[in-house]
Amino acid sequence: MKELHQRTQFIDLTGDTPDKLAIGTFGPAGSGKTRLTVTMPGKIGVIPLDRKQRRTIENAAAELKLKKGKIIFPKQDFVRLSKPMELAMMESEAAMKFYRDCISIDPGTQLCEDVLFANYGRDQKIYPRDRGAYNSEMKQILASIQHKQVVIPFESRPIWRNDKPTDKNEWVGWSKLDYNVNIIVEQIGPPHTAKLDHDFSLTIRLCQDRPDLIGETVLLDENITFEMLATTIYPDGEWG
C-alpha cells in the first residue's frame, strides 16, 4: 500500500517588516496618547468608549489642523458597551466603510472593563483562571482589526512592590495585551515632565522585534507621531 505523505519544507527566517502595526500605549491623562492616535496615516476610524473621548479626539485633530473627514466616528457611540463583540461583528459593508485605513478603540481600559462586565456581570475580583471567555473575546476583537493600523490607548497606574508604589507604571487593562500587539509604549506629559527639558515623551516598554529599544525613550514632543514611532522600530517600512 502506497504511503501518502507530504514533505515539510523549512525556510530561513526573513525578518520581513510588517505592513500593519498594533500599538498599545499607556499613560496618565494629558500625556499625548490621543495625539499619537490622530497622527496615523489615511482615514482613522475611532471608537470612543467614554463620554469625554470624542471631544478629546476632536481637540487633538484641531490642534494638528487635520482635514475634515480625516477622523470618523461610528454613528452611535459605544459608550458602556452591552455587547463588546459588536466591534468584531460589524456588518461587512459597515466595516469596510469604517475600517478604512486605521482604527483606534479609546480608551482600551474601558473596553476591557466592558468585556469583563458582559461576561461576568462585574469587572472586579475575577480570578485569572476564570477569565477564559474574557481572554477569548479580547483576542477576537484584536484579530478582527489586525488588517489595519491600530492604536489602543490605556490608562496607567503605579506598579506596587512590598505594599508600596514604585516609580514605574503599567497599563490598566488586559494583562495579555503584550502577546497580542507589536509594540507597547508609555507616554508621559505635564505635570510629570515639569523638571525636564521637554513636555512629552514616549518610551518603548515592549517590542519583540526590537528588544534593544525596550526601556529607551525614543521620541519627544512634536516628534511623537505614528510615522516616527513606526520608523524608529521598522526603518525599512513605509508608514507615511
Image (cartoon, helix red, strand yellow):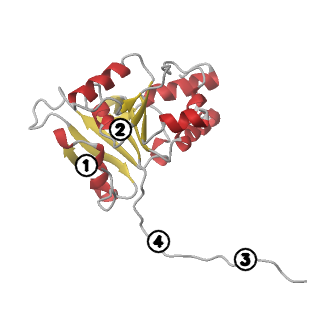
- Residue 177 appears in the picture as rendered: yes
Q: Is residue 103 left or right of residue 230?
A: right
Which mark's residue is nearer the viewer, 2 or 3?
Answer: 3
Residue sitting nearer the eye, 45 or 51? 45
Which structural element holds mark 2?
A: strand
Query: In x, y percent, where is residue 72?
Result: 41, 29
Pick whichever of labels 2 and 4 is earlier in the sequence: 4
According to the picture, the residue beneath numbered tag 4 turns out to be 13
Q: Name which quarter of the figure residue 4 lies in.
A: bottom right
Question: Could you tell me how far apart the alpha carbons at marks 1 and 2 are, in whole angstroms?
Answer: 15 Å
Pick whichever of labels 3 and 1 is earlier in the sequence: 3
Q: Is residue 38 above or below residue 77?
A: below
According to the picture, the residue beneath numbered tag 1 turns out to be 228
Query: In x, y percent, where is residue 182?
Result: 42, 50
Query: In x, y percent, where is residue 109?
Result: 44, 28
Which structural element holds mark 3?
A: loop
Residue sitting nearer the eye, 201 or 47? 47
Check residue 25 in the rendering and tell me which mark sits there, or answer none. Answer: 2
Pick whichever of labels 1 and 4 is earlier in the sequence: 4
Residue type at mark 3 is Gln
Question: Could you tell me how far apart the alpha carbons at marks 3 and 1 are, in whole angstroms?
Answer: 45 Å
Residue type at mark 1 is Met
Q: Are marks 2 and 3 in contact (CB under 8 Å)?
A: no
Q: Callout 3: few (<14), some (14-19), or many (20+) C-alpha neighbours within 10 Å?
A: few
Question: Could you tell me how far apart the alpha carbons at marks 2 and 3 are, in whole angstroms?
Answer: 44 Å
Q: Quadrant location of the N terminus?
A: bottom right
